[in-house]
Image (cartoon, rainbow, N blue to C red):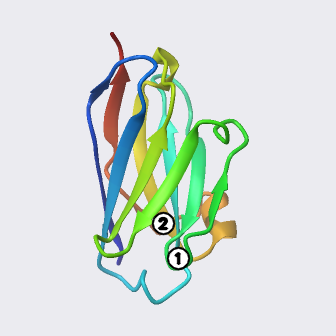
Amino acid sequence: QVQLQESGPGLVKPSQTLSLTCTVSGGSITTNSYWLAWIRQPPGKGLEWIGYISYTRGITVYSSSFESRASIFRDTSKNQITLQLTSVTPEDTAVYYCASGRNLAEVRAGECDSWGQGTQVTVSS
């Protein structure tokens, strides 16, 4: 079973770049074609899918709403993936999650087999 743990700053100022890390452990994520996703949930709203990365190949796919501001990286030596979101505004305030699944289609459909516990990010001056 893959285990995921998000980390990052709880408070970010407007116009800054948000950087979050998801540490991956357990399971066979390095041997199978696992995909990971960054998802967020703003207060009072539903889940928003930000982007996806192939853990073994480093290929990235972004949702159109975030394509211009989001970047997702992997560091397999640290078993981590990183989300960077530029030019944040208070509308980026949300709980941010990483999740994993066996392939991109399943992850995009929300059929993830592992979720992190989420990390709260508040954008405020």
Judge from the rendering whether residue 102 lies leftward or rightward of residue 83; answer left or right: right
Please name the residue that numbered disc 2 is placed on: 100
Residue found at the very far right of the displayed protein: 64
Q: In the picture, which quadrant includes the C terminus? A: top left
Query: How far apart in space, not on screen, are marks 2 and 1 (Cα)?
Result: 7 Å
Within the image, what quadrant is residue 14 found in?
top left
Task: Identify the residue at horizontal 46%, vertical 16% (top origin).
Answer: 90
Residue count near mark 1 (Cα–Cα under 10 Å), binned few <14, some 14–19, many ≥20: some
> x, y (%) of residue 116?
35, 55
Where in the figure is residue 86, as x and y percent of width and height? Answer: 50, 32
Marks 1 and 2: in contact by CB < 8 Å? yes
Query: Residue at the location (26% across, 31% down)?
Result: 10
Q: Amino acid at mark 2?
A: Ser
Judge whether 122 appears above or below 107 on screen.
above
Q: Position of residue 80 (x, y in %)?
A: 34, 64
Instruction: Give me the disc on residue 34.
Output: 1
